[in-house]
Amino acid sequence: MAAKVKRTTVDLSAYPDLVVIYLGMRVNSLRGMKTLLQTGPGIQAAVAAKPDGLLLHENLMFSLWPVHVLMRQYWRDFESLETWARSTMPHAKWWKEFLRDPGGTGFWHETYFRRGGFEAVYDDIPAPIGMMQFAPNVAAKGPMFSARQRIQAAGDARVAPPVGEDGLL
C-alpha cells in the first residue's frame, strides 16, 4: 500500500543545544487588553532586531476568551536566550515594569531543552495551565527563582538578572 501522506522530519544535528520556549500573556482584566496591545510592538521590534541565537519566532493564539496570546521561540542555546533576556533593554525594562505592576495580565513561560530538561514560571496566572496542571506548584524563590537555577545549569550567567530575588521582597 503506497502512503498518501508526505512525511518530513528535520535534521537537528547542527543544533545540539536547541532550546524551545513558549511564552504566554493572559489578559486577566479589561486593563490587561491595553497592556497586551502596548506590549506587541515592543516584541515585534525585539524580534526584528534579530538577536544573536534566535532562530525563529512565531506568534500563536492560545484562547480568545480570556484573551491569551502565545509566542514560540527557537534559540540556538540557553546562553543566547538568557543573555538576551537579561541584557536587552526592551526586555529587561519590560520585565522590571511587569514585576512592579502586571497591568491586568499574567505571564508565563515553559522552556524545553534538546539535551534534556524543562523549566517553567507562571506569574499571575489565575487558573493552572501547562505543567501547572499536573506537577506540584511551588513558589518561584530560592533555588526555583531563575531559569538557570531551575534547570541546574552549570556555570554562572554572563549577565545579572534585571530583577534579583531580593528586588521582589
Image: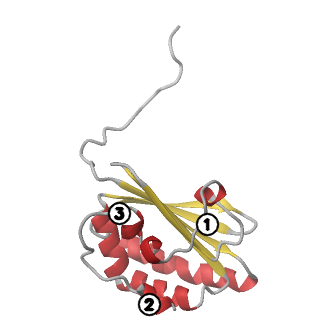
Tag 3 secondary structure: loop
* Occupied quadrant, residue 161: bottom left
Question: Residue 101 in the image: x percent, y percent?
Answer: 59, 90
Front-most of 143 and 1? Answer: 143
Determine the residue positioned at 61% across, 80% down.
37
The residue that label 2 is drawn on is: 166
Q: Nearer the viewer, mark 2 or mark 1?
A: 2
**Dot 2: what SS?**
helix
Q: Is residue 149 above or below residue 104?
A: above
Residue 144 position within the rendered picture, expressed as x and y whole percent measured from the top left: 46, 71
Mark 1: which secondary structure?
Answer: strand
Task: Give the number of callouts.
Answer: 3
Whole-percent x and y of residue 29?
74, 81
Disc 1 target residue:
69
For the point 52% across and 24% down, which residue is it?
5
- What residue is rendered at 47% in x and 80% in y? 42
Question: Looking at the image, is 130 positioned above or below residue 166?
Answer: above
Dot 1, how many residues are within 10 Å of its Cα: few (below 14), some (14-19), or many (20+)?
some
Judge from the rendering whether residue 63 lies leftward or rightward of residue 80; answer left or right. right
- Disc 1 marks which amino acid? Val
Tag 2: Cα neighbours inside 10 Å, few (<14), some, or many (≥20)? few
User: Which residue in the structure is indicated by mark 3?
Assistant: 152
Tell which circle, 2 or 1, labels the residue nearer the N-terminal end.
1
Q: Are marks 2 and 3 in contact (CB under 8 Å)?
A: no
Q: Residues within 10 Å of mark 3 (few under 14, many from 20)?
A: few
- Upstream in sequence: badge 2 or badge 3: 3
